[in-house]
Image (cartoon, rainbow, N blue to C red):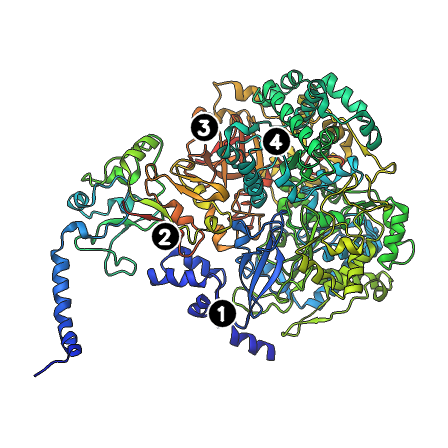
């Protein structure tokens, strides 16, 4: 009761005081004086962001921005224990004091719509009895009971333990997040693979970065991006593949743009749309800015560039001796591109999709620039070609091959192992790299090793303090990536799932696959928002503490930089009341692991010896993430992500692990020695860049120490019949859903549908020929007599549809709750080419329904960059349309009100190795709403 | 009776106030503050002469950007003599989207104006450029995020003539072309600074 009194006193709503206190206060006070009565809508909305009084001394905390994978340093401004503002960190080497609008407003969505209690669904799905809940798909108050935290934890653990005992550990799954801290990712992996002995653990990194990760494994032998952001300012030629960097990674883009402006380097963007990245670079110098407007042809164009370089610029190719010494399979690669990938052949082969938008001369010009930059960089010992690729490039059913194709070209021309060049995958999420490094994916172990690696398995088994042989049990289970996991659930093989710090809305094919699967399973959710989409399907729901409120932790961004995410150690709701039941995700995972492990007969005090040593002034007790981090660092010894130099620094200099990272503004892994850790880790990898001798991880991580070439092929000869098979997946269930079937009927149909896991040969074939999941009715599109009504009548799908993001928002949860960012993009939209709009009578601003074989959503038509539907601003090619996925639940997460859910229409086809789905090439039609 | 200087000033104050009020009454109309008028509005004097305060444009405005000037309301203090009851726009609250009812129509408010106080403006870039001059965007470089070390650019993305009237320079700095800016205020409306770093000022 004491606590309650204290909080009530400090939290009286007083707008004037808030204004004085808040960081934006000075400005807001002025504005409110100019327009008394708070009529100025924007200021009023800004104040809604936090409508209670913050009290206490001001201080500043260091953190990595919670949004994209650039990983800017941000300073959290705190008053007492309330977060009141964000400012960029001027001393951080990544952003050097620059920040984009998402990061600048990252404080706004924290105290909004918070989940305050543990909720337990009254009518739960119970795989033990086969009962399926009738209330899944709803999250109103009346479908839940409020249950105290400890009781709810005990009940959930009991249910999961029963399921494990009856169906085996692998019947329980988990989907984690690239936004959890490194420590939480370590613990969730321990919980699943160690305690439950399940190999069904995945993370949203699967839809984000795994194509790059598996591409790196295939080529370099380790998921280790070799570059740093500092390479930008040294590069002679920079290209972006499937990467609208200006919108999705603004700070990265402006570093490139700044370099282009001062040094006049050439740039290339490969993207189906004329994005702001394209126009931004053209603004600097149109003569040195190039654009490959391709839908699916990246592999072919990269091979064609190699063809031109090999045949016309042999001096740009590394010597045979070098290639033999450092690589394998390069001869097959060179033979292959010479035989099948001349620019002429490629343009001809891709005509069906790319319609000649990329020309032979374009490819030859880029090849020339690539060759010149490579030679220049090699002669100087710095610079060369630097290549970025984004999530769009990874999200293809041949995503791994996309990455390999880039690395091939870099190996061939020696753009690796010196400052100013290299292949740089840009992660989408702030900590996706750590999710990969912590092995929080099926079949993976921490530190870039597989679950099939017996020695490393034993090492991690020991470091996780598990009974001997525990991980050998887990290793027996076949790997199962997230989309196959959903299919397994419908088949009855996967019974229960944990969801941590991620939403199911990011996954493809929601209506015919994901939601029916979640309806059937027993689902345990950790979330921060009361109206988050996961609550629709959760049976047990635990309130979590979010970024900025944490007790500390580590994020790793795209240049392998570990940085701290400090926090205020308490969660508050929109009235400033402390949420007493909320815990950090790591704490929730530890407590669950302890409870479940005990029921399974494990000695949990030994496995998880962590104690709750952090106590806040409200009496909440938390585990110290630094204890977990110390265990992580110890376990990294001998891996190619060895961080143990930091332990030496701690021992010799007495500087704590987190404090070292704070002082250096980040440490780039690996940091295996004292000297190395002292100066901030390793900026570049491979070919002796690490400057240490005799370490097993200095060379490429394949057994022979060499990198591998792999020629990735593209051939459209089987495109039509293969796509036809893909397009049938989910179609019948989608039809039923469109007719208004109940969720029970949809589930029954979904259970009987054809599953892609049973058709892996089809996926592999599509991957090996670099095909697309769906092919629109191009004959229908080309028939100028056809109208939109005809498409509906004849059930045809004439348009390409690609999904992506809109600049002002990050993902689906936070920025749409921040007052400032929410205001900027109020509505879902679809970008349409102006010729298509004229031909089909689509007006700018008109509301339409976008329909695919599996579902539909509503949006406003946005035609060209002059559109009044703001802020749609990219020009799409003819026949292609685009909608952002991060507005999916901006109207409402409640399915009865939600109309913008774009992933209702997407296709589940995934890359058979990387598991990433292809969101970019769907077949859709547009229906007018009458 | 001798007045100290202070007292003299004090006693003169009411008189001064009355006089200044009278001068305000008598001052030439040009000195009156010009508010942001709906698109296609004539020059202020002509506009005031023609506008019959019928509020048809206010009703036609789907975005509710056009409001009626009422000196008794807070925030309408700028209303000068003879301006009460006339339509105007405060872009920070709601900006003009230059809307039309359907393809081929003119801007909605200009279509309903019975007196021609708002000239008919066709919904084409050329016509809008020619007839619409609600004001002009002005950037306050001292507080604009993009001019002070970060990168924002939301105003540029909101501009109906993006890349022309308002384009993004390095680090998304907004650059206004005064010739092409029609003063719709969408940039001011979306600005994430409080107070706004970009503002439409009457021409």
Disc 4 crowd rating (10 Å Cα; few below 14, some 14-19, many 20+) is many
Q: Are marks 3 and 1 in contact (CB under 8 Å)?
A: no
Which image quarter: residue A246?
A: top right
Q: Are marks 1 and 2 in contact (CB under 8 Å)?
A: no
Residue at mark 1 to residue at mark 2: CA–CA distance: 26 Å
Residue at mark 1 to residue at mark 4: CA–CA distance: 49 Å
Q: Nearer the viewer, mark 2 or mark 4?
A: 2
Taking A441 as reference, is A190 above or below it? below
Disc 1 crowd rating (10 Å Cα; few below 14, some 14-19, many 20+) is many
Residue hosting label 1: A53
Residue hosting label 2: B93
Q: Which mark is residue A921?
A: 4
Is disc 4 on the same chain as disc 2? Answer: no
List x then y, in percent, for residue A60.
58, 64
Question: Is any part of residue A83 visible from this angle?
Answer: yes
Question: Is any part of residue A128 visible from this angle?
Answer: no
Q: Residue at x 69, y 22 (%)?
A: A309
Chain letter behind tag 1: A
User: Which of A111/A406 is in front?
Assistant: A406
Is disc 1 on the same chain as disc 3? Answer: yes
Chain letter behind tag 4: A
Residue hosting label 3: A834
List x then y, in percent, for residue A190.
80, 55
List x then y, in percent, for residue A491.
76, 42
Q: Is tag 1's residue or tag 4's residue first in the polypeptide sequence?
A: 1
């Amino acid at each position: 009761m004491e606590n309650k009194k204290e909080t009530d006193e400090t939290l009286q709503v007083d707008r004037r005081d808030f204004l004085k206190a808040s960081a934006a206060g000075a400005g807001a006070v002025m504005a409110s004086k100019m327009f008394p009565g708070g009529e100025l809508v924007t200021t009023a909305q800004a104040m809604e962001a936090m409508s209670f009084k913050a009290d206490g001394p001001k201080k500043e905390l260091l953190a990595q921005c919670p949004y994209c994978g650039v990983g800017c340093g941000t300073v959290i401004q705190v008053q007492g224990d309330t977060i009141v503002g964000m400012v960029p960190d001027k001393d951080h080497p990544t952003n050097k004091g620059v920040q984009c609008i998402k990061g600048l407003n990252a404080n706004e969505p924290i105290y909004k719509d918070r989940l305050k209690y543990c909720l337990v669904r009254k009518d739960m799905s119970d795989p033990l009895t086969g009962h399926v809940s009738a209330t899944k798909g709803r999250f109103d108050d009346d479908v839940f009971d409020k249950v105290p935290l400890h009781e709810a934890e005990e009940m959930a653990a009991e249910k999961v333990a029963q399921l494990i005992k009856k169906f085996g550990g692998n019947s329980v799954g988990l989907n984690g997040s690239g936004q959890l801290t490194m420590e939480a990712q370590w613990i969730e992996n321990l919980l699943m693979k160690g305690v439950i002995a399940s190999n069904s653990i995945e993370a949203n990194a699967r839809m984000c970065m795994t194509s790059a990760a598996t591409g790196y494994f295939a080529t370099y032998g380790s998921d280790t991006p070799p570059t740093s952001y500092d390479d930008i300012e040294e590069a002679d030629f920079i290209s972006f593949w499937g990467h609208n960097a200006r919108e999705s990674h603004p700070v990265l883009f402006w570093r490139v743009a700044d370099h282009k402006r001062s040094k006049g380097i050439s740039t290339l963007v490969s993207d189906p749309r004329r994005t702001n990245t394209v126009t931004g670079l053209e603004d600097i110098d149109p003569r040195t800015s190039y654009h490959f407007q391709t839908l699916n042809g990246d592999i072919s164009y990269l091979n064609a560039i190699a063809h031109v370089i090999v045949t016309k610029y042999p001096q740009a190719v590394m010597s045979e001796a070098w290639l033999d010494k450092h690589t394998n399979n390069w001869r097959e690669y060179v033979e292959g591109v010479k035989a099948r990938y001349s620019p002429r052949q490629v343009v001809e082969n891709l005509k069906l999709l790319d319609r000649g938008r990329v020309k032979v001369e374009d490819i030859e010009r880029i090849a020339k620039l690539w060759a010149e930059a490579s030679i220049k960089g090699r002669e100087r010992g710095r610079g060369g070609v630097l290549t970025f690729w984004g999530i769009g490039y990874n999200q293809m059913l041949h995503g791994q091959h996309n990455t390999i194709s880039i690395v091939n070209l870099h190996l061939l021309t020696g753009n690796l192992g010196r400052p100013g060049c290299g292949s740089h995958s840009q992660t989408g999420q702030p900590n996706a790299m750590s999710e990969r490094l912590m092995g929080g994916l099926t079949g993976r172990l921490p530190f870039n090793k597989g679950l099939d690696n017996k020695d490393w398995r034993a090492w991690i088994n020991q470091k996780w303090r598990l009974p001997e042989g525990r991980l050998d049990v887990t290793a027996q289970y076949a790997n199962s990536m997230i989309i196959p996991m959903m299919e397994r659930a419908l088949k009855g093989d996967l019974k229960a799932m944990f969801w941590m710090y991620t939403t199911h809305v990011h996954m493809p094919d929601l209506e015919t696959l994901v939601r029916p699967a979640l309806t059937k399973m027993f689902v345990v959710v950790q979330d921060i928002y009361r109206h988050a989409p996961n609550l629709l399907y959760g049976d047990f729901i635990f309130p979590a503490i979010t970024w900025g409120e944490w007790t500390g932790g580590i994020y790793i961004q795209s240049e392998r930089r570990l940085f701290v995410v400090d926090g205020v150690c308490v969660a508050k709701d929109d009235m400033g009341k402390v949420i007493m039941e909320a815990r950090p995700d790591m704490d929730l995972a530890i407590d669950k692991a302890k409870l479940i492990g005990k029921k399974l007969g494990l000695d949990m005090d030994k496995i998880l010896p962590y104690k709750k040593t952090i106590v806040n002034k409200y009496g909440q007790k938390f585990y110290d993430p630094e204890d977990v981090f110390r265990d992580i660092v110890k376990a990294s010894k001998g891996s190619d992500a060895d961080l143990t130099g930091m332990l030496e620094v701690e021992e010799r200099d007495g500087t704590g692990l987190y404090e070292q990272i704070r002082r250096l503004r980040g440490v780039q892994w690996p940091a295996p020695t004292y000297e190395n850790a002292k100066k901030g880790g390793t900026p570049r990898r491979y070919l002796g860049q690490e400057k240490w001798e005799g370490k097993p991880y200095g060379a490429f991580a394949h057994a022979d120490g060499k990198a591998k070439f792999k020629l990735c092929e593209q051939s459209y000869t089987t495109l039509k019949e293969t796509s036809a098979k893909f397009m049938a997946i989910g179609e019948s269930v989608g039809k039923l859903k469109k007719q208004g079937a109940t969720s029970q009927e949809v589930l029954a149909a979904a259970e009987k549908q054809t599953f892609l896991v049973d058709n892996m040969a089809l996926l592999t074939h599509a991957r090996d020929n670099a095909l697309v999941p769906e092919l629109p009715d191009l004959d229908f599109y080309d028939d100028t007599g056809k109208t939109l009504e005809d498409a509906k009548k004849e059930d045809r799908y004439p348009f390409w549809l690609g999904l992506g993001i809109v600049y002002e928002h990050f993902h689906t949860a936070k920025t749409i709750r921040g007052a400032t960012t929410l205001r900027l993009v109020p509505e879902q939209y679809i970008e349409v080419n102006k010729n298509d709009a004229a031909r089909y009578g689509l007006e700018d601003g008109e509301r339409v329904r976008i329909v695919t074989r599996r579902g539909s959503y509503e949006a406003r038509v946005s035609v060209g960059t002059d559109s009044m539907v703001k802020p749609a601003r990219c020009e799409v090619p003819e026949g292609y349309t685009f909608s952002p996925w991060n507005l999916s639940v901006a109207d409402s997460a409640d399915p009865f009100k939600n109309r913008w859910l774009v992933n209702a229409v997407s296709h589940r086809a995934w890359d058979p190795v990387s598991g990433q789905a292809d969101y970019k090439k769907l077949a859709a039609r547009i229906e007018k709403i009458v | 009776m001798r007045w100290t200087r202070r007292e003299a000033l004090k006693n003169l104050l009411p008189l001064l106030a009355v006089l200044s009020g009278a001068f305000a009454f008598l001052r030439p109309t040009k000195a009156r503050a010009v508010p942001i008028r709906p698109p296609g509005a004539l020059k202020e004097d002509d506009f005031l002469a023609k506008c019959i305060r019928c509020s048809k444009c206010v009703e036609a405005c789907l975005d509710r950007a056009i409001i009626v000037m009422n000196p008794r309301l807070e925030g309408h203090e700028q209303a000068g003599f003879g301006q009460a009851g006339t339509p105007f726009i405060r872009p920070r609250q709601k900006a003009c989207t230059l809307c039309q009812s359907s393809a081929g129509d003119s801007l909605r408010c200009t279509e309903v104006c019975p007196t021609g106080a708002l000239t008919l403006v066709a919904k084409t870039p050329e016509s809008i450029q020619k007839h619409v001059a609600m004001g002009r965007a002005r950037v306050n470089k001292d507080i604009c995020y993009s001019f002070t070390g970060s990168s924002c650019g939301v105003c540029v993305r909101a501009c109906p003539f993006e890349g022309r009237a308002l384009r993004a320079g390095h680090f998304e700095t907004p650059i206004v072309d005064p010739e092409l800016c029609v003063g719709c205020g969408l940039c001011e409306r979306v600005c994430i600074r409080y107070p706004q770093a970009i503002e439409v000022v009457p021409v």
